Image (cartoon, coloured by chain):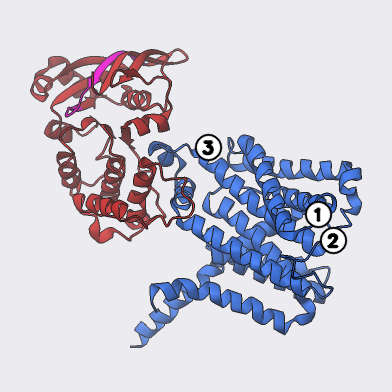
Amino acid sequence: MTPLMKSWAPPLALLALAIALSFLMPFNLAFLTRILIMVVLVLSLDLVLGYAGIATLGQAAMYGAGAYAAGLFAIHVWADPLAGLMIGAVAGSILAFVSGLVLMRTQGLTLIMLTIAVAAICHEIANKARDITGGADGLRGIHMEPVLGMFAFDFVGTTGFWYALAVVVVIFVFVALITRAPFGLSLRGIHESPDRMAAIGVSVYWRRVTAYTVGGAIAGVAGALSAQITQLVSLESFSFTLSAEALIMLILGGTGRLYGAVLGTLIFMFVHHWAAANDPFNWLFVIGAMVLAVVFFLPKGIISASAGLARLIKGARHAGS
Amino acid sequence: MQGLEVRGLTKRFGGLTVAEDIDFDLGPGDRKALIGPNGAGKSTFSNLVTGILTPTAGSVRFDGRDIGGLNEAQRVRLGIAKTFQITTLFQDLTVRENLRLPILERERRGYRFFRAADGNAQTEAEVRDLMDQFDLGPLADSKVANLAYGQQRLVELALTLALKPRVLILDEPAAGVPSSETHLIDDAIERLPADLAVLIIEHDMDLVFRVARRIVVLVQGRILTEGTPEEIAADAKVRELYLGGSHD
């Protein structure tokens, strides 16, 4: 395989998988769309946590900000989907930048606690500001115009699915470019050794604030996408559960690997879907067992299993010859 | 004046004085060594010069400019670089990536979002030159974590040189390197650019006497004496210090 084919084959395979699933599960498009939205959120977390090493359990803060901003924008200003995505990105990045100015001065456990606190504060503000956000009832009355003026959102969710898929492709390419660029390399450097990065003349603080802001913008897009497609923003957008689930998906798949983020989300969502249908009370047990298995046997995530398998098969062949 | 000019540098931690009234110059082409027993304040001195610590009193000038208000990263960008005593390399990155990073940052390209990090021919040529200079070519795509310790020290040196510094502080460049590999470090230091100002902080007297042209002896945060290797070797105070020190 040529290097070019090698780099294009996995994303095309994923795209083919998404399209195949849409034909295999035509009555579950809403579920598939939900997966796509989560992929965007987990990609943002991968950039922040997987690449830059910023420990966070509050990525939902930016997701929620994007969701409410896009929802309010659609209701009061303009119901164009793409403009709404922009608004979501701007809202997510502003919240990430402003909170990041404080958060990025801290590290480790302190940082984790503070990221949780930021999301909790946002949750409380959205809860209290009933007149604007609808409070615990959620933000209702979002009616989007057709995408690009051509594709109206339909009852089955066909438009929603393709729209979300297109956004996932754009975001994936965006994050892939960033992580291959000098900026991405510097984030990996900060993850590995912040002291050394300072010693080669880098302001680690500002680099981390930038990464957190870009990650916030992407999380904001995920939130906006959710608001537009489900036509509802609930307080759950800011919930700790959402942040934690995104983290579990990323750990399952493998941090610092874009395909890890996608794979982890797919696996988590499907396991959740089936396990919860079979046993609504104990489905978390299955997820818990999977996380334990991954942490013990595949510390680099399920995405590393293929490389491990390849080595195993190679080794077996050598042993056989 | 060109290079580093340190005057009256003093650092106290509470009642403990770890650097006291140090005067020190380092100009282009200098090869100076800073020696002294454990706890003499050698590392403190290098941290004061590189901006990791702030002095209690005294001044640090570079090319005549007071750099006391600059932090570590800003001083690195001016051209004052330092290798670490304990390796803090990017363990999970390859040798090539470890050398690419400082070059990109030196050229202020760290905020580029959409150009491949390995896409610049000039940068890649520079990475290759550095690897050739330190015989790291065959290890280019190995992760640093998988390298022998002596090789890691070479990557450390190459990485710091990639910043094209004008003042280079080598903090125990041979620490932890097995004696079979120390010649690698020696050779590397000998091949440093002639106009580079080099300060070596080292325990290993053999290495110091091989590469330094002037030696500064630091004891309890004060400069005891300064001279050529011959003068230092003949100095009664220094001999007493080192021979006496080995008894307790």
Q: Are marks 2 and 3 on the same chain?
A: yes
Which amino acid is tagged 1? Answer: Ala
Tell me which label, 2 or 1, sits earlier in the chain. 1
Classify mark 3: helix, strand or loop: helix
The answer to whether residue A201 is left or right of residue A253 is left
Residue under numbered circle 1: A74
A116 relative to B68, above or below = below
Q: Element type at marker 2?
A: loop
Chain A image colour: blue
From this viewpoint, is residue A239 visible? no
Question: Is residue B215 found inside the magenta-colored segment of the image?
Answer: no
Question: On the rendered structure, is A15 left or right of A304?
Answer: right
Q: Mark 3 points at which residue?
A: A205
Q: Which residue is drawn at 44% across and 55% down?
A: B115
Q: Which of marks 1 and 3 is nearer the N terminus?
A: 1
Tags 2 and 1 touching, CB below 8 Å = yes
